[in-house]
Image (cartoon, rainbow, N blue to C red):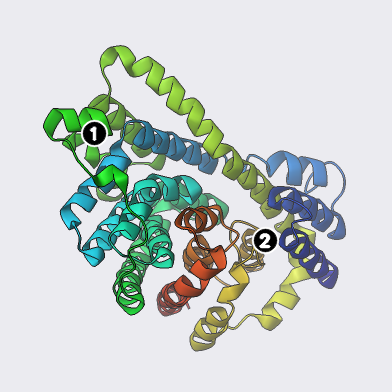
Amino acid sequence: MGVVILLLMAAGVAAMLTRRLPTAFALVLLAVAIAFAAGAPLTGKNSVLDTVLQEGAPALAATMVAILLGSWLGKLLEETGIAATLVRKIVEFGGDRPVIVALGVLAVSALVGTVTGSAPAAMLAGLIGIPAMIAVGIPKVTAAGTILMGIAVGVPFELPVWQFFSTALELPVDTVRGFMVKLFPFALVAAVAYVLVESRRRGVEHTWSLKSLQGRPTSRGRRQLLGDAPWYALLTPVVPLVLALGFELAIIPSLLAGVLYALVTTTRPREMNRRLLRTLYGGFEVAAPPITLFVAIGILLAAVKLPGAVDALEPLVKAVSPQNAVLFVLVFTLLVPLCLYRGPLNVFGLGAGIAGVLIATGIYPAAAVLGMATSYNQVFGVADPTSTQTVWAAQYAGVSPQQVMVRTLPYVWAVALGGLCVTAATQL
């Protein structure tokens, strides 16, 4: 029966890779098929309808709320001009020094990445950042990659991601936070190395004139024309992070505090109600795709944790899972490409199911699976040509997602290696 379940998983991967089915739909169908293959009854305890669908769908509800709040905060960063102001300030400071401008945009991308992920984060930092970098001579591929590498620096501190791994892997938020702090230096070093190496290796290419940086007005008139946010509002991306990381406040209150801070520091009292509702509705629109995906992931996790599925998969998974720490690092480092192109190790796809199997069968402790999944997530978020942020950044810069993948993959592969080494050293 375990072989049948593995074949079903392979069929699910094929359906996602060939785009015959959207990822969320494929995961739900796969979950139902796995449940039937594992001998689950239609209704009752450990059943298809009551356990997999009914209990699985809202299993990641806390993550969905965190995603919505992060998207809401992202819309506020966009509408109030906070994100755009941060990028403009960096560009003004860097002047005509390409590397300084790129490193500044990298820093802003990292800040935005702590608030929201995927395409919205890329757009917040990239709408001004990408043309600004190209205007001072940063090659197009390097400019797109800089936005993505910057977002990846922020991902270890993205609160909705903490909530996702905490809920999906049934781990305390403190455990997730602790590993993310260890992962951050690898992401930071890789991102800075990317900017320094790629910008120098590729040379200066003046191909894009940025009109928005010419003839800049000054003081209050400049703010009104360009939509600059007040300086104290620029601290908005840091507020949730300080509360969650420094004061260990819960994730949802921390995100709500960020929303309120952005609103109070940028909006007149008589306009607050309209802005709150407008950005909240916009946040729903942004959050709808990932929330749909998390509903499907919850259903898949419920299916692979059924007793029949665990019993069927345990001997097969144990036979192929390395237990030695060195082999663990080597094998899973070599398997990094399997998280690309919506592959089987993509944690926001079938990878979540595989993670659930590894934990449910007792192959690895949940904290070790956390290390593996988060390390792979650093690769997927930057180099996967099918991820929305990679597609947007590449197309906006005027290059293909595959070009961005080739340039960024060695750096994020090194980040995954670092995360796997930390995992092996601390958990195995």
Q: Is residue 284 visible?
A: yes
Which callout, 2 or 1, points at the residue further toward the start of the chain?
1
- Which residue is depicted at the point 85% across and 68% down? 4
- Work out which residue is located at the far left of the displayed protein and give it: 219
- Which residue is depicted at the point 83% across and 60% down? 38
Q: Position of residue 262 (x, y in %)?
A: 29, 31
Taking 169 as reference, is 142 left or right? left
Q: Which residue does the numbered mark 1 point to in the structure image? A: 229
- Amino acid under label 1? Ala
- Amino acid under label 2? Leu
- Which residue is depicted at the point 52% across and 69% down? 403
| Quadrant of res 272 | top left
Q: Is residue 247 visible?
A: no
Rendered image: mark on residue 25: none
Name the front one of labels 2 and 1.
Answer: 1
Q: Position of residue 66 (x, y in %)?
A: 47, 40
Taking 422 as reference, is 103 left or right? left
Q: Which residue does the numbered mark 2 point to in the structure image? A: 350
- Mark 1 neighbour class, 10 Å CA radius: few under 14, some 14 to 19, many 20 or more: many
Q: Quadrant of the N terminus?
A: bottom right
Task: Please tell me whether mark 2 sits on a helix, a strand or a loop.
Answer: helix
Which one is nearer the viewer's eye here, 340 or 255?
A: 340
- Which residue is depicted at the point 75% across and 70% down? 313
In the image, residue 83 sits, relative to residue 38, either above or below, namely above
